[in-house]
Image (spheres, rainbow, N blue to C red):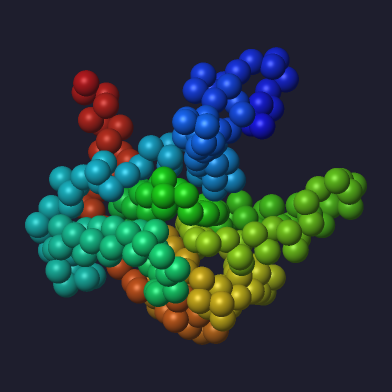
Amino acid sequence: MLKDNKNGEVKCSLCQDRGFIIKNEIAHRCSCVKQRALEGLIRHSNLGRLHSQCSFAGFSFSYYPNSLDKEAAITYYENAQKAFKAAKAFAEAFVAGNYHGPGLVFTGPVGSGKTFLASAVANHVLAKGKQVLFSVVPDLLDEIKATYDRSNPSAIDEMAILDGARNVELLILDDLGVHNYTDWTVNKIYSILNYRANHQLPVVITTNLSLAELDTYLGERTTSRILQLCRVYRLASVQDIRYLKSKEHSLE
């Protein structure tokens, strides 16, 4: 029985919250069961309201001109096309079955669409009933540190947080590279990536650091794991896309 609200109100008029419908004396699972399962996945995905609105259909190539991106030696538009095609192909392959292929790293400056594309992957996967954990790296590390506060014995412990990141079907690490790295932070990140590499569990990463900078800040061991787990794609635009979007909205 699916009724769990305190007011006793029926949420599904089709099955009266029983979870099944009788047709010709045969019980059939109600569509609300799948919907509630999907809502549960979304709640546990850690996707914010803004990120939950991102989709492949909503990705606009208009922010990526045909002018040359000197760092990548191809145009901004070509970069975006490659990253978009890779993201969509990854998401479709992931939901098609037991996927153990390479994940994705989106590199590029702030406001270049990296998080949008990673969120589009998350939403596509969630819509197909797959598990996703969307973790902003600094927030994840702060959450782990908070478990060391002995004044709050009811707080979730460190291993529960790490196990969640290690074992979820798809892990998305957003903003890898926006905080100061210590041996402690590097070890925590390596622990998660090493586990997922050993168990062939994919990860999607966004970072504003180049591969050389990742090597400098995270060390060769962690960067090697990232390259083992993922294929790297660059996203860049002439201007911060967030700024451009806010400017467009102000003109409406």
Say which residue appears at 23% left-offset and 53% top-offset. Answer: 237
Above or below, 223 against 13 in this view is below
Say which residue appears at 61% left-offset and 29% top-offset. Answer: 18
Res 147 → quadrant: bottom right
Above or below, 113 against 21 in this view is below
Say which residue appears at 41% left-offset and 45% top-offset. Answer: 127
Nearest the viewer among 134 and 217 is 134
Say which residue appears at 58% left-offset and 22% top-offset. Answer: 16
Q: Quadrant of the C terminus?
A: top left
Nearest the viewer among 154 and 251 is 154
Left or right of 197: which side holds 159?
A: right
Q: Quadrant of the N terminus?
A: top right
Residue 5 is at least partly visible in this image? yes
Residue 218 is at least partly visible in this image? no
Residue 202 lies, in percent from the top left, at 47, 69
Residue 169 lies, in percent from the top left, at 53, 62
Q: How many labels does the image show?
A: 0
Residue situated furthest front in the rendering: 25
Nearest the viewer among 207 and 164 is 164
Left or right of 251: which side holds 5?
A: right
Residue 49 lies, in percent from the top left, at 47, 35
Residue 214 lies, in percent from the top left, at 46, 73
Above or below, 58 against 163 in this view is above
Left or right of 73: which side holds 41?
A: right
Left or right of 47: which side holds 237?
A: left
